[in-house]
Image (cartoon, helix red, strand yellow):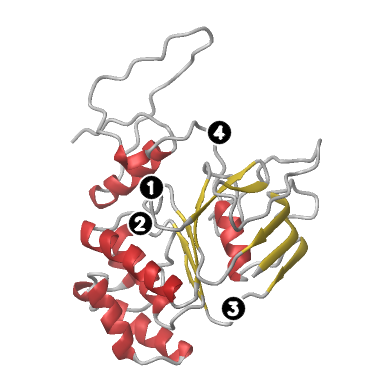
């Protein structure tokens, strides 16, 4: 699969989100995509999956069977989980039995009778993963798949990824939590300032934006999947110990900080805290 001079922006006069990207994805590749919020990771994944067309350039050699799990699963649908999966299995032309096997592997059998709208973030993420895997994919695109998952499912997902790669499939994962940082043989791409850089340098080829090119993040797309925010220094996310001490502004000339309190549902607290800390923010949880 080959990206040649791929550029993208959300409107004709809008700023470029990605510009002149050159990438090669070989069969059996596993690629972890990182970068700050709003850098264009989800945009890159949707281009790879074929959900959106490029603004310029071409993507050639996309495999025939593509599995895609978005960062935010659309729970606003009039189905129970099993009803949704039955519907998707008919569309994909696969047996429901194989789908139920995936539910067992991803620790989701207890969710099958629940309405989609009643699911927590982590539970909805499992449903999104199952639908992306029900037809064995030649190209699997996962956007923040580990967010909100229980420990059993976190441990199982890399095994599934390894199986797909071993069979010749390509797997691309956007991951704030760096769960694939030490995955054997994985490539690691950084999306930053409109360019995509391969940290391993083994399979990916990159062309940075031309001097003076516009690299500001585009406005959010209509589905809200790209959310710009001020850049933050990279961190190790949920591998850091919890921060329980009182907040204090950082010393130094020009340092200026404020405390923002955010009230969230208890079921979503772990996932939200992990993302904030992965983006370099200090967090403190109160009951």
**Residue drawn at the location 38% of the way across and 77% of the way down:** 78
Q: Evaluate whether residue 222 shows in this view.
A: no
Label of residue 177 in the image:
1
Helix, strand or loop at disc 2? loop
Image spot of residue 87 (x, y percent):
40, 86
**Residue drawn at the location 63% of the way across and 75% of the way down:** 62
Q: CA distance from mark 1 to mark 3?
A: 27 Å
Residue 112 picture quarter: bottom left
Q: CA distance from mark 2 to mark 3?
A: 24 Å
Q: CA distance from mark 4 to mark 1?
A: 19 Å
Tags 4 and 2 touching, CB below 8 Å:
no
Label of residue 146 in the image:
2
Helix, strand or loop at disc 3? loop
Q: Nearer the viewer, residue 174 or 29?
A: 29
Q: Is residue 255 left or right of residue 2?
A: left
First reached walking from the N terminus: tag 3 or tag 4: 3
Q: Nearer the viewer, residue 42 or 60?
A: 60
First reached walking from the N terminus: tag 4 or tag 2: 2
Tags 1 and 2 touching, CB below 8 Å:
yes
Q: Which residue is mark 4?
A: 230
- Classify mark 4: residues with Cα within 10 Å, few (<14), some (14-19) or many (20+): few
Q: Evaluate whether residue 250 shows in this view.
A: yes
Residue 56 picture quarter: bottom right
Tags 3 and 4 touching, CB below 8 Å:
no
Q: Quadrant of the N terminus?
A: bottom right
Q: CA distance from mark 1 to mark 2?
A: 8 Å
Q: Which residue is mark 3?
A: 63
């Amino acid at each position: 699969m080959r990206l040649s001079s791929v550029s993208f922006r959300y409107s004709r006069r809008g700023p470029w989100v990605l510009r002149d990207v050159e990438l090669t994805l070989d069969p059996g590749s596993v690629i972890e995509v990182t970068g700050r919020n709003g850098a264009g990771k989800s945009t890159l994944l949707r281009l790879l999956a074929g959900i959106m067309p490029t603004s310029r350039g071409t993507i050639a050699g996309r495999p025939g069977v593509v599995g895609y799990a978005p960062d935010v699963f659309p729970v606003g649908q009039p189905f129970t989980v099993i009803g949704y999966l039955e519907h998707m299995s008919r569309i994909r032309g696969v047996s429901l039995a194989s789908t139920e096997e995936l539910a067992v592997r991803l620790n989701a059998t207890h969710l099958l009778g629940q309405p989609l709208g009643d699911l927590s973030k982590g539970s909805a993420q499992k449903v999104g993963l199952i639908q992306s895997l029900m037809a064995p994919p030649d190209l699997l695109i996962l956007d923040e798949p580990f967010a909100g998952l229980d420990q059993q499912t976190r441990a199982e997902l890399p095994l599934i990824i390894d199986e797909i790669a071993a069979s010749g499939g390509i797997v691309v994962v956007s991951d704030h939590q760096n769960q694939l940082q030490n995955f054997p043989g994985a490539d690691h791409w950084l999306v930053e300032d409109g360019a995509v850089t391969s940290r391993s340098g083994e399979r990916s080829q990159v062309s940075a934006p031309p001097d003076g090119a516009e690299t500001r993040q585009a406005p959010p797309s209509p589905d809200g999947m790209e959310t710009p925010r001020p850049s933050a220094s990279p961190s190790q996310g949920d591998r850091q110990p919890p921060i329980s001490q009182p907040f204090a502004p950082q010393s130094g000339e020009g340092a200026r900080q404020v405390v923002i309190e955010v009230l969230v549902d208890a079921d979503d607290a772990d996932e939200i805290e992990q993302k904030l800390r992965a983006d370099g923010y200090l967090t403190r949880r109160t009951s």
